[in-house]
Amino acid sequence: MSRFDSPLTNIRIASPCSADWEQMYGDDRKRFCGDCKLNVYNLSGMSREEAEALIMNAEGRLCVRFYKRRDGSVITGDCPVGWARVKQRTRVLATAAFSMLMALFSGVFIVSLFSKARSTTIMGEMAVPITTSTPKHTMGAVSIRPEPNFDGDQIMGKMRIEPHRR
C-alpha cells in the first residue's frame, strides 16, 4: 500500500482556464476570477503547509494556479530551490547595481580631479568691477617694426655693412 505524503504531489488540473491572472482583482496569493466566479489561489505564492491545508480543507470546487517542475512537483513560496534562484537573481542584480554605481562615482571622481576650478561661487550682492579703460579694436594694414639696436635706439633705413672697428 502506498503512503500518502502530500496533496501537492498528486495535484492535477481537470479543466485548464484561459483567464488572465493579471486581469483579476486581488493580491499575489488570492484573486477573484470574473469568468468562473471563484477565488483563484496561487499555490506558488504560499508556503507548503498553507497550500496543503488549503487543498485538504477545500469544500466543492477549488480553482488554483501553480508552477510545476519537470519532475511534477509543485513549486511553493518556501521551496528551497525556488528561494535559491530568487537569491541568485537578487545577488546578480545587486552586484550589477553596485558595479554601475561604483563606475558612476569613479567617473565623477576622476573628472573632478582633472577639471580646473573655473569660478568660485559667492553669495551676496553683485558688484560690477571698475575698469579704467575699455579695450578698443584697432583696424588697418600691418607693418612690422624693425628690431631695436643693442643700444636701445631704433635705426630705420637701408642696411649698410660697416667694417668691424677695434
Image (spheres, rainbow, N blue to C red):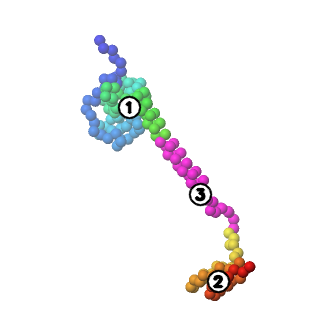
Three-letter code for the amino acid on which mark 1 is drawn:
Ser
Spot occupied by residue 23 in the image (x, y as percentages of width and height)? 34, 43
Q: Nearer the viewer, residue 65 or 126?
A: 126
Q: Secondary structure at mark 3?
A: loop
Please give the name of the residue rendered at 33% of the width and 35% of the height, measured from the top-left corner. 38
Q: How far apart, in angstroms, are the residues tagged by discs 1 and 2?
A: 107 Å
Q: Quadrant of residue 19?
A: top left
Please give the name of the residue rendered at 27% of the width and 34% of the height, measured from the top-left corner. 16
Give the side of residue 65 with respect to residue 107, left or right.
left
Is residue 111 inside the magenta stretch?
yes
Instruction: Reply above or below: 61 against 34.
Output: above
Kindly indicate whether the residue at mark 2 contacts the one at mark 1 (C-beta within 8 angstroms). Answer: no
The residue indicated by pointer 2 is 161
Mark drawn on residue 115:
3
Spot occupied by residue 101 in the image (x, y as percentages of width and height)? 52, 46
Q: Nearer the viewer, residue 114 or 119?
A: 114
Label 3, residues with CA under 10 Å away: few <14, some 14-19, many ≥20: few
Spot occupied by residue 120 in the image (x, y as percentages of width and height)? 66, 62
Could you tell which of marks 2 and 3 lies nearer the N-terminus?
3
Residue sitting farthest toward the left: 15
Three-letter code for the amino acid on which mark 3 is drawn:
Ser
Q: Secondary structure at mark 2?
A: loop
Could you tell which of marks 3 and 1 lies nearer the N-terminus?
1
Q: Is residue 99 visible?
A: yes
Q: Secondary structure at mark 1?
A: helix
The residue indicated by pointer 1 is 44
Which stretch is magenta? 96-125
Q: Quadrant of residue 85?
A: top left
Q: Quadrant of the N terminus?
A: top left
Kindly indicate whether the residue at mark 1 contacts the one at mark 3 (C-beta within 8 angstroms). Answer: no
Q: How far apart, in angstroms, are the residues tagged by discs 3 and 1?
A: 55 Å
Q: Nearer the viewer, residue 155 or 108?
A: 155
